[in-house]
Amino acid sequence: MMYSRRSCLAGLSALGVLAALPATAFAQADYPNRPLRIVVGFAPGGSNDIVARLLAEKLQKSLGQPAVVENKPGGGGAVAAAFVKSQPADGYTLMVGASGAMVVGPAIGAPAQYDTLADFEPVSILGTFPLVLIVNADSPHKTLKDLVAWSKANPSSSNYASASPTFTLAAELFKLRTGAMMQRVSYRGSNDSVMAVLGNQVTASMVDTLPAMPLLKDGKLRALAVTSTTRLAELPDVPTMAEAGVTGAEAVFWTGLFVPKGTPKEIVGKLEAEAKTTMQDPEVRQRLRALATEAASNSPAEFTSRITNDLKAWSEVAKTAKVTLE
């Protein structure tokens, strides 16, 4: 078979172009061609872990590769973040990161193991959740107004339990907006904070709904307000902060998907699309709603903007309330 000189030159030119393409271009086109791991900064069983496992299940089905959840608890998620920061930016190490580690910790001056926006590519938010302000069911405080008035009259006896900087800043924001006089008492975990309220060791606590829900439903705890802008379906009789007469005390936190900085945009885009599909799945939404978490998704640009705004807002709260790491 005879080839023209022009055909030969065109073929050689094409080969030259292919040879000039970086190896990453081929890897992106074939992504993923091996297992993915999703790192979570908390122990198995918590809400972040559950979100990660729901995502892993869907990714495995849609991408045709195993997606393994790897738990690296410690530092409220900071240990996992520091680890993921150091991994190759190839799309095979993902992180389900909570706002506590990614915005609240930096806002109160946590040691600089990583920089959220400089060291990570935000892919998509995955879910949002408010906190709930609880007191013992036998407490004389029936409303937020009751609690605030009593705390001002009894500042030496009024306190609140907090298991992390996230809960502390939400409580301090509430204090700034109301003038409530409450001292912080630190506990190791949300369950401990809830039990402290149940045992009348503290006046109140600002906690996530998951550990408090069973005792709220059993009537052993009382919820005075939720920090979301709308009422929770699981607690329809509990007012929002605004409905209870406190404006500007909303506090909605999130869980999101991150990859190391420098991950190719094509891979970030593919993961964003997968996250969106997963979080719109009715089964996923129902399972998360049972945890008082609302499934959500957005673009990398939108997620980056949310992080930037949250960092600014919580830094101002921490500065005004003089909150520092213990």
Image: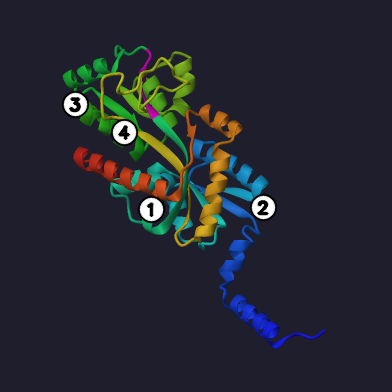
Q: On the image, numbered disc 3 is attached to which residue?
A: 179
Give neighbour class at mark 2: few <14, some 14-19, many 20+ (Cα, 10 Å).
some
**Residue corresponding to mark 4:** 170
Q: Residue at x 31, y 44 (%)?
A: 309
Residue 133 spot, x, y in % from top left: 35, 24
- The residue where tag 1 is placed is 116
Name the quadrant containing residue 6. bottom right
Q: Position of residue 126 (x, y in %)?
A: 49, 41
**SS state under label 2:** loop
Residue drawn at 31 percent across, 33 percent down: 170
Task: Name the residue beneath numbered marker 2.
Answer: 65
What amino acid type is highlighted by mark number 4? Ala
Principal secondary structure, stretch drawn in magenta: strand
Q: Nearer the viewer, mark 2 or mark 4?
A: 2
| Residue range highlighted in magenta | 131-137
Secondary structure category for the residue under label 4: helix
Q: Which tag is nearer the camera, tag 2 or tag 3? A: 2
Which mark sits nearer the N-terminus, 2 or 3? 2
Eye-nearest disc, 3 or 1: 1
Pick whichever of labels 2 and 4 is earlier in the sequence.
Answer: 2
Q: Nearer the viewer, residue 74 or 21?
A: 21
Residue 233 - label = none
**Upstream in the sequence, badge 1 or badge 4?**
1
* Amino acid type of the residue that numbered disc 2 sits on in the rendered structure: Gln
Element class at badge 3: loop
> Alpha-carbon neighbours of circle 3 within 10 Å: few (<14), some, or many (≥20)?
some
Asked where in the image residue 315 lies, by quadrant, the reply is top left
Q: CA distance from mark 4 to mark 3?
A: 14 Å
Image quadrant where one finds the N terminus: bottom right
Way the structure is coloured: rainbow
